């Protein structure tokens, strides 16, 4: 069963800096602990990564998934839909960024996960919250520790 989960966090960086970190996919293995490798499969006319394949650690094993990114609301939002996955049918989400007025950004992270293997609801929810909490925490650490380019 699919359900959307949403998490919010304030990050000490501008929306532009957060967006820059989020769209530097090749650098994810440097700061996102569960991401083992990233391959840019296709770029759009502006050179932005459109189709990206990730290899990650999940549920005690390696998993692979490919996401199609949508830049239609950039730089206020970065969204994606899964186009392939070995253990997920759906891994769709978005990061929405809004300036707080003090040089920080409120990030809203939305995620829909549908696994190919059925799991008890409480296990799935725990996994979703772990994914979201880890992703936002690692994003916050990366944005706040890297200079604006």
Image (cartoon, grey):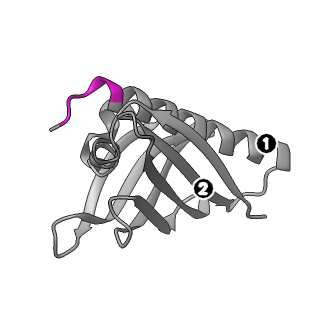
Task: Point out the residue furthest to the top here.
Answer: 145
Q: Is residue 42 left or right of residue 149?
A: right
Task: Please name the residue shown 30% across and 31% down the image.
Answer: 30
- Whether residue 87 is visible to the viewer of this picture, yes or no, is yes
- Whether residue 120 is visible to the viewer of this picture, yes or no, is no
Residue 88 within the magenta-colored segment of the rendering? no
Q: Which residue is mark 2?
A: 111
Q: Which residues are magenta?
A: 144-148
* Whole-percent x, y for residue 19 in the image: 32, 49
Residues 43 and 106: in front is 106
Question: Sequence order check: which comes first, mark 2 or mark 1?
Answer: 2
* Whole-percent x, y for residue 1 in the image: 79, 64
Q: Which mark is residue 87?
A: none
Q: How many marks?
A: 2
Q: Nearer the viewer, mark 2 or mark 1?
A: 2
Task: Please name the residue shown 35% across and 34% down the image.
Answer: 103
Q: Which residue is mark 1?
A: 123
Say if 32 sits above or below 79 in the image.
Answer: above
Task: Please name the residue shown 67% across and 45% down the image.
Answer: 128
Q: Please identify the quadrant where the C terminus is shown.
A: top left
Say if 130 sits above or below 141 in the image.
Answer: below
């Amino acid at each position: 069963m699919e359900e959307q989960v949403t998490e919010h966090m304030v990050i000490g960086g501008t929306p532009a800096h957060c967006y820059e970190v989020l769209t530097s996919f090749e650098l994810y293995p440097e700061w996102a602990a569960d991401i083992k490798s990233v391959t840019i499969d296709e770029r759009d006319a502006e050179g932005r990564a459109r189709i990206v394949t990730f290899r990650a650690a999940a549920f005690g094993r390696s998993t692979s998934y490919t996401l199609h990114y949508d830049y239609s609301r950039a730089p206020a939002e970065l969204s994606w839909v899964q186009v392939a996955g070995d253990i997920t049918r759906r891994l769709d989400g978005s990061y929405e960024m809004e300036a707080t007025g003090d040089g920080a950004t409120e990030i809203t992270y939305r995620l829909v996960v549908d696994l190919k293997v059925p799991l008890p609801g409480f296990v799935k929810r725990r996994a979703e919250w772990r994914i979201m909490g880890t992703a936002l925490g690692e994003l916050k650490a990366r944005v706040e520790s890297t200079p604006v380019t």
